[in-house]
Amino acid sequence: MSDLFYIGMDLCPDFTQLSYYNDITREPESVSQLNNKETYLMPNVLFYSVDTEHWYVGSEASEARFNEKGIVVDNIFEHLAANESITVADQVYSYEDLFLMMVKLHIDSFLYRYETAEVKKLVISIPEYDAELFNLLSRLYELMEVSKDTVEITSHLDSGLYYIFNQPHEIWNNSVALYDYSNDGLIYYRIDVTRNEEPQLIQVTREDYSSVMSLSKYGTDVYQMDLDFAHLAETELKKAYISAVFLTGIGFTNKWMKRSTDVLCAGRRVFAGQNIYTKGACYRAVGGEYAEFYQDYFVNTKENVTNDIGITLGDEDDTFVPIIRGGSQWYNTSGNISVILDDTDRITIVYRDLVSKEERRETVRIHGLPQRPNKTTKLLLSVEFESPHAGAVVVKDLGFGKLFPTTNKIYRKEFTV
């Protein structure tokens, strides 16, 4: 019998972190480096050993490069956009192939610690949506030889929310602050919970302070960095009643916070950790009880769809049939339904805004359908997005079995919500 693992991965340009769901503690647990139990950051570097004809990844690659002859492959993220290739041991590799190999080897390096380990669900958290990276990672399931729905890609923001809202309720009973201080600079999120609406609303406000605070700006002047962050935090924390503050990112690893610690801790609980996103991704991978929260709350972020989109049946009850439900990232939102036309060549599309509660309708005529008897035209309706607020309803003629074969015609009704 196999050991099935729910895995969360935080995939960044320089380092990768992994966590897995511990069935005993019922919590995500971070995966340390195999040769350094105190470190969870796994370098995104590959090494091909000429001596053993074997690929290494992470800390094992960093160690093997000094002990064996071979080729080091690093800066893989940077090479992706250039569409470059590299020859290793007389074989030509594209950096896309090497990137997917690196991700898989990070996972395998954990699975190899168990005799019969398999991935039940893998959620990969990336800093923010990037079309090329998203599409590339969407191919990973083939390399892993698992079903397509085993692998899911999400964002740091979504993972951070999953982590925060799976903490005890008293921690997020009021507004919550999340500071992410990476090599690119400081990003601030304020998460406000509104409970007097149905569904209850979680509003996420994002502020980009990377032009104000960055590691390159301060260098070794941590004193000034402390003063600037204290001032910035004091200004933001006055805008709402914050019950808890979460700090993550490499910028918070060194012990430079003194004045800013006093500001943050004034009547609040403060949590700092580099594994917030990987553990949040792990919570999402598990789903079940950890996803029930999203049934009661609608989360409004810059990347989430704010509308339910569907059709009305046109009956006495004006029944609404959803094609997709809002509340998830636009790039992870999809759905379809089949309908049989009843003496009509029209469908009425309904857009329900979950924030404003407004509803908009569009009646669309499906031109060019062949003449068929009533109730013998079946359509497949699906929704696809190109951003949180724009996309298309796609209508495909399915015909009706062998008697009335499909025309394979596809219609697109673009929308903006």
Image (cartoon, rainbow, N blue to C red):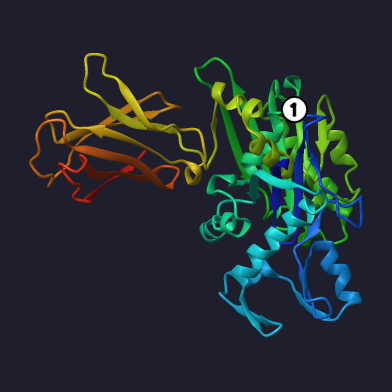
- Residue 214 seen by the camera: no
Q: How many marks?
A: 1
Say whether residue 39 is left or right of residue 143: right
The N terminus is located in which quarter? top right
Residue 37 drawn at (x, y percent): 91, 50
Residue type at numbered disc 1: Gln
Q: Quadrant of residue 7?
A: top right
Tell me if residue 113 comes above or below residue 121 in the rendering: below
Residue 121 drawn at (x, y percent): 64, 42
Q: Residue at x 76, y 67 (%)?
A: 45
Q: Label 1, secondary structure: give it.
A: loop
Crowd rating for badge 1 (residues with CA inside 10 Å; few <14, some 14–19, many 20+): few
The C terminus is located in which quarter? top left
240 or 77: nearer the eye?
77
- Residue where numbered disc 1 is placed: 167
Tell me if residue 406 comes above or below residue 321 in the rendering: below
Q: Residue at x 22, y 14 (%)?
A: 316
414 or 210: nearer the eye?
414
Residue 352 drawn at (x, y percent): 37, 28
Say whether residue 187 is left or right of residue 81: right
399 or 181: nearer the eye?
399
Residue 396 drawn at (x, y percent): 26, 45
Q: Residue at x 84, y 28 (%)?
A: 266
